[in-house]
C-alpha cells in the first residue's frame, strides 16, 4: 500500500511539473488551422509539435520521401508551436 501511494504521489508531482513547464510557451499560431477537425487531406500526414522534436521530424520526413512507400503517403512537418501550443492545439481539436 505504501508503494502504491508513493507511485501515485510521484505521478501527481510529475503531472504538475509538466503542466507548469508548458505555461510559458507561446500560443499556437492563429489562422493556420481551423478549430473544426473535418476530414483530413487524404494521403497526407501532418506533424506539428515542439521545437525540440522538429529536427527529428524533419529527418524522418526526409527519409520517408526517399522510401518506396512515399507514393502512398506524403509527410508534412508544420512549424513548431511549443509544448503549451501543442497542448492548446489538442484542446482546440486541431
Image (cartoon, rainbow, N blue to C red):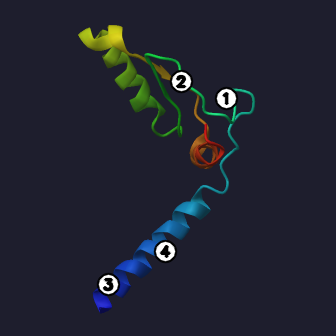
Total labels: the figure holds 4
- The residue that disc 3 covers is 4
- The residue that disc 2 covers is 40
- The residue that disc 4 covers is 13
Q: Earlier in the sequence, mark 1 or mark 4?
A: 4
The reply to whether dot 1 and dot 2 touch (C-beta < 8 Å) is: no
Which quarter of the figure has residue 8? bottom left
Residue 91 badge = none
Report x, y in % for residue 72. Answer: 34, 12
Q: Earlier in the sequence, mark 2 or mark 3?
A: 3
C-alpha separation, residue under disc 4 versus residue under disc 2: 36 Å
Q: At 27% across and 13% down in the image, what residue appears?
A: 69
- Mark 3 residue element: helix
Residue at far bottom of view: 2
Report x, y in % for residue 76. Answer: 48, 20
Q: Residues within 10 Å of mark 4 (few under 14, many from 20)?
A: few
Q: At 46% across and 69% down in the image, what residue appears?
A: 14
Mark 4 or mark 2, whichever is nearer to me: 2
Q: Earlier in the sequence, mark 4 or mark 2?
A: 4
Mark 1 or mark 2, whichever is nearer to me: 2
Residue 76 falls left or right of residue 35: left
- The residue that disc 1 covers is 33
Amino acid at each position: 500500500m505504501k508503494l502504491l501511494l508513493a507511485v501515485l504521489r510521484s505521478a501527481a508531482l510529475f503531472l504538475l511539473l509538466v503542466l507548469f513547464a508548458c505555461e510559458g510557451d507561446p500560443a499556437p499560431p492563429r489562422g493556420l488551422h481551423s478549430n473544426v477537425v473535418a476530414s483530413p487531406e487524404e494521403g497526407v500526414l501532418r506533424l506539428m509539435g515542439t521545437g525540440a522534436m522538429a529536427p527529428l521530424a524533419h529527418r524522418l520526413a526526409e527519409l520517408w520521401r526517399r522510401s518506396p512507400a512515399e507514393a502512398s503517403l506524403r509527410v508534412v512537418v508544420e512549424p513548431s508551436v511549443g509544448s503549451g501550443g501543442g497542448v492548446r492545439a489538442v484542446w482546440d481539436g486541431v
